[in-house]
Image (cartoon, rainbow, N blue to C red):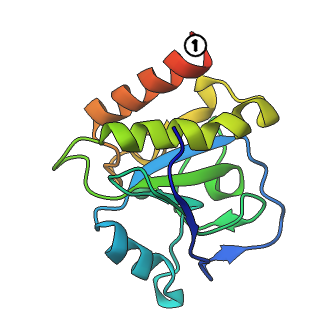
């Protein structure tokens, strides 16, 4: 299955230093797909993700992997701060506290991950969500939805 992939360049990124690509932080955008795209391409927002995934699985590429998107803010993962430098940011359109991820969103995330997983030597330990790296400050994803996503990742890339 292949989902539609579109490009909406965001001005909200840093071209240097080069992104380390040590793993991925997953988010939800709260806003719906179109409203999120508008915000993420507005320089005034100073926010971006590498990729935004619509409920139907359509993926919008906003920032190239080699560049630093502005998604994590104050955060710590694997003992390091400045997570934007080393975690790619992928967001699901919508609010996972209000509605679960669609099966298409999860399948599309796996499709996005597939070529990168082997290329970067990732393991499930390289995957996280915003809630986990900014506890008390951020609540995305809902814990049940993060568990569903992580189980799908393990199912495809570890047990698949
Ligand atoms: Zn977030």
For image coordinates 48% across by 76% down, the residue present is 40
Image location (x, y in percent) of residue 85 = 71, 57
Q: Residues within 10 Å of mark 1 (few under 14, many from 20)?
A: few
State the image coordinates of residue 127 (x, y, percent, origin top left). Answer: 56, 34
Name which residue lies at 36% across and 61% down: 29
Residue 118 in sight in this render: yes
- Residue ranking furthest to the left: 98
Q: Is 117 left, or right, of 62 in this rendering?
A: right
Residue nearest the observer in this picture, 91 or 132? 91
Residue at left 51%, top 26%? 153
Tell which of 6 and 126 is nearer to you. Answer: 6
- Quarter of the figure with residue 120: top right
Residue 72 showing in the rendered view = no
In depth, the one of 62 and 21 nearer the eye is 62
Image coordinates of residue 91 in percent, x first then y, are: 45, 55
Write down the quadrant of residue 12 in the picture.
bottom right
Extreme residue in the top direction: 159
For disc 1, the marked residue is 160
Number of labelled discs?
1
Residue ID at (35%, 58%): 93
Q: Please state if 109 lies on the left or on the right of 77 as rendered.
A: left
- Judged from the image, the quadrant occupied by ligand 1 is bottom left
- Residue at the far bottom in the pictured view: 44
Q: Is residue 142 above or below residue 152?
A: below
User: Relative to residue 7, is residue 106 depicted above or below?
Assistant: above
Quadrant where the C terminus sits is top right
Q: Is mark 1 within 8 Å of ligand 1?
A: no
In the depicted structure, whether residue 79 falls above or below residue 154:
below
The secondary structure type at the circle numbered 1 is loop
Residue 125 x, y percent position in the rendering: 60, 25
Taking the image as shown, residue 103 lies to the left or right of residue 125, namely left
């Amino acid at each position: 299955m292949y989902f539609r992939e579109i490009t909406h360049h965001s001005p909200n990124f840093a071209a240097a230093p080069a992104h380390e690509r040590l793993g991925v932080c997953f988010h939800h955008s709260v806003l719906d797909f179109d409203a999120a795209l508008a915000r993420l391409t507005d320089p005034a927002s100073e926010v971006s993700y590498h990729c935004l995934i619509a409920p139907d699985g359509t993926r919008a590429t906003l920032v190239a992997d080699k560049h630093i998107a502005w998604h994590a803010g104050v955060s710590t993962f694997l003992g390091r701060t400045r997570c934007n430098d080393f975690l790619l940011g992928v967001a699901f359109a919508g609010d996972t506290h209000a509605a679960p991820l669609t099966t298409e969103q999860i399948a599309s995330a796996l499709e996005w991950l597939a070529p990168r997983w082997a290329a970067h030597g990732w393991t499930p330990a390289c995957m996280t969500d915003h809630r986990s790296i900014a506890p008390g400050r951020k609540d995305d994803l809902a814990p049940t939805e993060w568990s569903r996503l992580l189980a799908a990742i393990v199912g495809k890339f570890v047990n698949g």
